[in-house]
Amino acid sequence: AESLNSELGASGGFTMFEVLIQDANWGEDVAQSVLQDWQDDHGLTSVDVWTDGTTSCIDPFATAGELPVFVIVDEALVIREIITNGYNETVEQQIIDTVNGL
């Protein structure tokens, strides 16, 4: 996340954040302390981490249940792409291509 945010955010107009939908115990609500631990554990200095505090939003987009899910929205908050293939170099390039094409 940090490398994507650095690459895409350099030109402005790009904001990346992560939303935790459950804690490490799978299915338990996310406490505020878990958000800070997630940032610290993953070296996220320029990426905010959010939660709604409950597990109510578990997997609304990923029909296959693969996480993480990337939802790319434009400046008008229109969803441009939903990527549900987990995370690897191919997905990272897909995110870059999508954002650069907005």
Image (cartoon, rainbow, N blue to C red):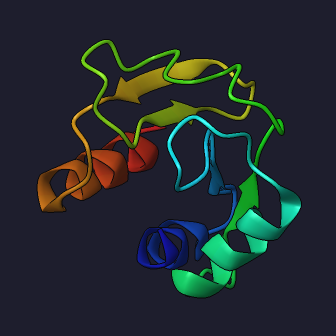
Residue 63's x, y, as percent?
A: 32, 12
In the displayed structure image, the side of residue 54 where residue 16 appears, left or right? left
Residue at image location 22% in from the left, 49% down from the top: 91
Residue 48's x, y, as percent?
A: 74, 64
Residue at image location 37% in from the left, 20% down from the top: 62
Residue at image location 71% in from the left, 19% down from the top: 56
Residue 47's x, y, as percent?
A: 67, 69
Q: Nearer the viewer, residue 98 or 60?
A: 60
- Location of residue 55 with respect to 44 vertically, above or below: above
In the displayed structure image, the side of residue 6 where residue 17 appears, left or right? right
Residue sitting at the far left: 90
Q: Nearer the viewer, residue 43 or 36?
A: 36
Q: Nearer the viewer, residue 65 or 29?
A: 29
Q: How many marks?
A: 0
- Location of residue 51 with respect to 57 vertically, above or below: below
In the displayed structure image, the side of residue 54 where residue 10 appears, left or right? left
Residue at image location 39% in from the left, 43% down from the top: 68
- Location of residue 28 with respect to 46 vertically, above or below: above
Residue 25's x, y, as percent?
A: 53, 50
In the displayed structure image, the side of residue 79 where residue 31 appears, left or right? right
User: Hey, which quadrant is residue 7 in on the image?
Assistant: bottom left
